[in-house]
Image (cartoon, rainbow, N blue to C red):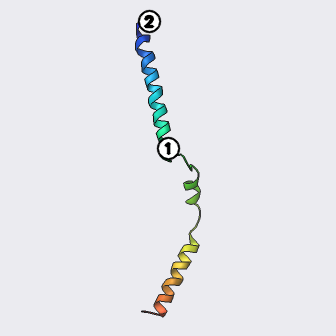
Amino acid sequence: MESLYLLIPLSILLAFVIGFIFWWTLRSGQMDDLEGPSWRILHDDDKSTQKTDSNEAEKQKNPD
C-alpha cells in the first residue's frame, strides 16, 4: 500500500512528460509527412540533370 503513494504520482508525472514530448514533436513539424521522404528516394531526378546538361552545353558553345 505504501508503494502506491510513490508509484501513482510517478506514473502521472511520466504521463505528463510523454504528453509534453508528443506535443513538442507535433509543434516542431516532425510528424507532418511520414511517407514523403521514403517515396522521394524512389523518384529519379532525370529532368533536373537534363536541364543542367543543356545549360553546360550552351555555355561551352557561347563562352562569355
User: Badge 2 is on which residue?
Assistant: 1
N-terminal-most mark, 1 or 2: 2
User: Badge 1 is on which residue?
Assistant: 27
- Residue 1 placed where, x, y %? 44, 6
Label 1 – label 2 distance at C-alpha:
40 Å
- Residue 2 placed where, x, y %? 41, 7
Front-most of residues 12 and 37: 12
- Measured along the vertical axis of the image, is residue 19 above or below residue 31? above
Q: Helix, strand, or loop for circle 1?
A: helix
Estimate how packed mark 2 is, as few (under 14), some (14 to 19) or many (20 or more) residues with alpha carbons within 10 Å.
few
Residues at marks 1 and 2 touching, judged by CB atoms closer than 8 Å = no
Q: Which residue is most to the top? A: 1
- Measured along the vertical axis of the image, is residue 57 above or below residue 43? below
- Residue 4 placed where, x, y %? 44, 11
Front-most of residues 49 and 26: 26
Q: Going by the image, does 36 lie left or right of 12? A: right
- Measured along the vertical axis of the image, is residue 14 above or below residue 58? above
Q: Which residue is at a point 50% across and 47% down the rendered structure image? A: 30
Screen quadrant of the C terminus: bottom left
Q: Which residue is at a point 55% across and 48% down the rendered structure image? A: 32
Q: Which residue is most to the front? A: 27
- Residue 14 placed where, x, y %? 44, 26
Q: Amino acid at mark 1?
A: Arg
Q: Helix, strand, or loop for circle 2?
A: loop
Estimate how packed mark 1 is, as few (under 14), some (14 to 19) or many (20 or more) residues with alpha carbons within 10 Å.
few
